[in-house]
Image: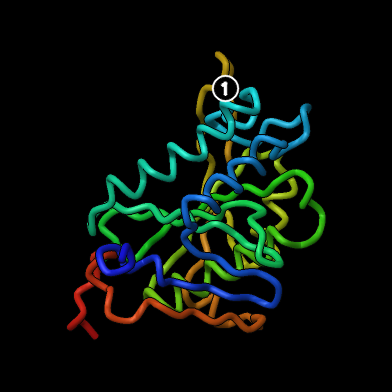
Amino acid sequence: MLIDHWPLHGLRVRTARLELRLPSEDELAEVAEVAARGVHAPDVRPFLVPWGELPPAERARHVLQLHWKRLGRWTPQDWALNLVVFLDGRPVGIQDVRAKEFGVRREIVSGSWLGLEHHGRGIGTEMRVGMLHLVFAGLGAESATSMSFTDNLSSLTVSRRLGYQPDGITRDVLDGKVVESQRLRLSRSDWESRERPPVTVTGLAGYAELFGIDPGAS
């Protein structure tokens, strides 16, 4: 069975309404269809790589290829986990977690997208809460980072609500113009100090080495 060779297919993160996990191939196709229907309004540009503006078929293909590429390039020193977000058993978006030299740095960066039809229901906050529990309680992270354009108020609001603090500005080029992103950081101590809704993580035990963690470390 696939799970015997890639045990992270057994990983489950559950919040009050959501389940975050790796998808089957049919479920991956379904979340690609969610993306094809739209991930943001036409007048909004939330991504430095503007994949959300591609034609629907190309947008769906981007979701598929990025998922396969990240799994195929996974090493303990450089990994990226695309967790599909399920609401009532159906995919609604993706919450990703990425890290380089996690065993040493104990730091992750995250990103996410949610099908446009599911915006405005608190799902974006809830899926981030689940991801943070996974990395802090499950993987022993010391900090979680994120980045959003300075005019992406919805994403920045989620980060601030969860306790992230400003961590500087990054300047990039998009379509020949400079765009600024706000970097944000949430420390383990700040995460632990806040009241948090219940989250459960299963299927993670015994696979520390996949994330670059020494299983014998304290």
Look at the numbered disc 1 and give the secondary structure of its residue. Answer: strand
Residue type (three-letter) at the residue carrying disc 1:
Val
Viewport quadrant of the C terminus: bottom left
Q: How far from the left and from the top, in percent, is residue 32?
A: 58, 42
Q: Residue at x 68, y 50 (%)?
A: 155
Q: Residue at x 64, y 23 (%)?
A: 55
Instruction: Tell me: residue 20, above or below residue 120.
Output: below
Is 79 rendered above or below residue 60? below
Quadrant of res 204: bottom left
Q: Is residue 37 left or right of residue 63?
A: right
Q: Nearer the viewer, residue 91 or 122?
A: 91
Around disc 1, counting alpha carbons within 10 Å, would you say few (fewer than 14), some (14 to 19), or many (20 or more)?
few
Q: Which residue is mark 1?
A: 178
- Name the residue located 53 percent from the left edge and 51 percent from the top edge: 26
Count of numbered labels shown in the rendering: 1
Q: Position of residue 119 (x, y in %)?
A: 78, 51
Residue 48, x across and y down, in percent: 55, 32
Residue at (67% x, 54% y) in the render: 92
Q: Residue furthest right?
A: 120
Q: Dividing the picture into quarters, in which one does residue 195 lie?
A: bottom right
Residue 6 or 175: which is nearer the viewer?
Answer: 6
Relative vertical location of residue 49 with respect to residue 15 in this rendering, above or below: above
Percent from the top left, x then y, of residue 45? 68, 30
Residue situated furthest top in the rendering: 176
* Quadrant placement of the N terminus: bottom left
**Visual colour scheme:** rainbow
4 or 34, which is in the foreground? 4
Residue furthest toward the front?
Answer: 1
Tell me if residue 171 comes above or below residue 209 in the rendering. Answer: above
Left or right position of 64 against 90: left
